[in-house]
Structure formats: C-alpha cells, structure tokens
Amino acid sequence: MNNKKLISAPFLNTLRSEGCFDELNSYTTTQLFTTVTGSAGTTAFSSLSLGRSLVLCTTAATNNDPQGFRTTNKVILPVSGRPCLVATQVKFANQSGSNANIIFGTVSTTTLTLTDGVAPTASYSGALILKLDGKDVWTVQSSNGATKTTTDTNVPATDGEYALSIAWNDKGDGFNAEVAFYVNGVQVTDADGVRIKHTVAYASLAEQYVYCAAQAGSANAQTAYFDYVGWAQQRYNLVD
C-alpha cells in the first residue's frame, strides 16, 4: 500500500481544499457512490489478504459489458484558480490476451461505455486514464464536450496493481487547464518519452463525477479491485 503516499497532507488539508478520501471499507450503492452496471454484473465490498478492504467490480460474461461505480453526486468542476486532483488504486488481470478494459477519472455523464477497445467518442466533460482492450499500455483522454485529446502512453498496463491519478492545474492564461496523468506517482509519457499534458478550455466544462469501472473485452467476465478513491479541489474564496 506504499502508493498511498499520493494522498498526502496537502490533498486532505480541509482548510485549503474540499474533497474526500474513501478507503472503501464498505460499499452501499446510492450513498457516497452509486453502482454503474451493464447487463448482469456486480459491484460489492470485498477483501484480499493482509486485511485490505476493496470494492470488487465484476462484469457479465458479455463483450463490452461495463461494471463499476461513480460518486453519487458530481464533485469536481475544473475552473481557473482552483486546481483539482483525483486518485485511486486498482488491481486487475486480463482474462485472455490484453482484453481487459479499465476506466478511471472524471466524467460529466452518469455512464461511460467503451466499444471494442476504442476510447470514448461520446460527448462529455472530464479526463480519464484507460486500459483498453487489445492494448498493453495506458491510454489517457481529456474531453470538453465533443472536443477530445487522446494519447497512448508508453507505460505498461499489464496484469497488476496500479495507483492512478489525474491533476488539473491552470495553464497560466486564465482560460485553459493543463491536465497531467500519473501512474504509480510518475507522470506518464508518450511513445517518444515526452511527458503528456493536455490543454482543456475551461469554458463550457460541466460538473463531473469520479468514475471507476471495469469492462469486459470478450465473452469472459472481467474483474477489477479498487482499493481507495480520493478527490480534492482548492476551496472557492479561499482565505488564508
């Protein structure tokens, strides 16, 4: 659990930021989080060894079937002067080949579905870290309505456990955010080894849910364990 260093004191300093850090010690849909389901999957409290508490998402054995959870309410709205951060830790294993789909980030829509390993094409506000069916590296995407930027990283996304986080910061012009993506505490890079940063206009961005899900990439059920979920944004009208 050493990756939890991502959730540091500044992240949870309630005098300067508002947000939540949930260890996922229990899970009841429609409380803090709400289940996102496809045809017949499950999202439920689970546990592994060493006394860890997790939420286990299990899809139906149907290609492209999603299963996960999101915050019940929209909790993030990137705006100038109010940086924000979302984070989780996820464990997964491909059912065959590289066919797992993993989704983490923020979205303005209540559901989000991938189709045969393609990053989302539907309109939404937010930013995502994705493990896509047929790929063994992480993919990142930012979106403001229909305007999207999608980048494949050079960071492996093979069977294992990963700390994922997304940070929104001002680009410095008052009109745009700079979105950075992190895996295991390190900012992701592209195929050329260049750190990935997306520029997203603040104008027209909608409020967003924090979203965690698995999706089947074949006719086999896909599982994913989520260990914690956290988010924070600098307070409005912060007074030192």
Image (cartoon, helix red, strand yellow):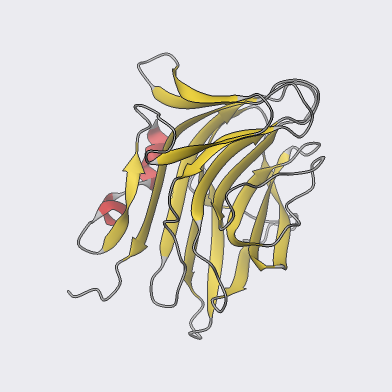
Q: Position of residue 236 (x, y in %)?
A: 30, 72
Residue ID at (28%, 56%)? 10
Q: Residue furthest left?
A: 240
Between 168 and 152, the residue placed more toward the observer is 168
Q: Is residue 48 above or below residue 160?
A: above
In terms of image quadrants, where is residue 228? Answer: top left
Q: Is residue 106 above or below residue 179?
A: above
Q: Position of residue 164 (x, y in %)?
A: 52, 44
How many callouts does the rendering have? 0
Q: Residue furthest bottom?
A: 173
- The quadrant the N terminus occupies is top left
In terms of image quadrants, where is residue 234? Answer: bottom left
Residue ID at (42%, 13%)? 49
Q: Position of residue 25 (x, y in %)?
A: 34, 27
In terms of image quadrants, where is residue 38? Answer: top right
Visible residue check, residue 165? no
Residue ID at (42%, 38%)? 30
Visible residue check, residue 173? yes
Between 183 and 39, the residue placed more toward the observer is 39
Q: Position of residue 120 (x, y in %)?
A: 73, 52
Between 27 and 218, the residue placed more toward the observer is 27
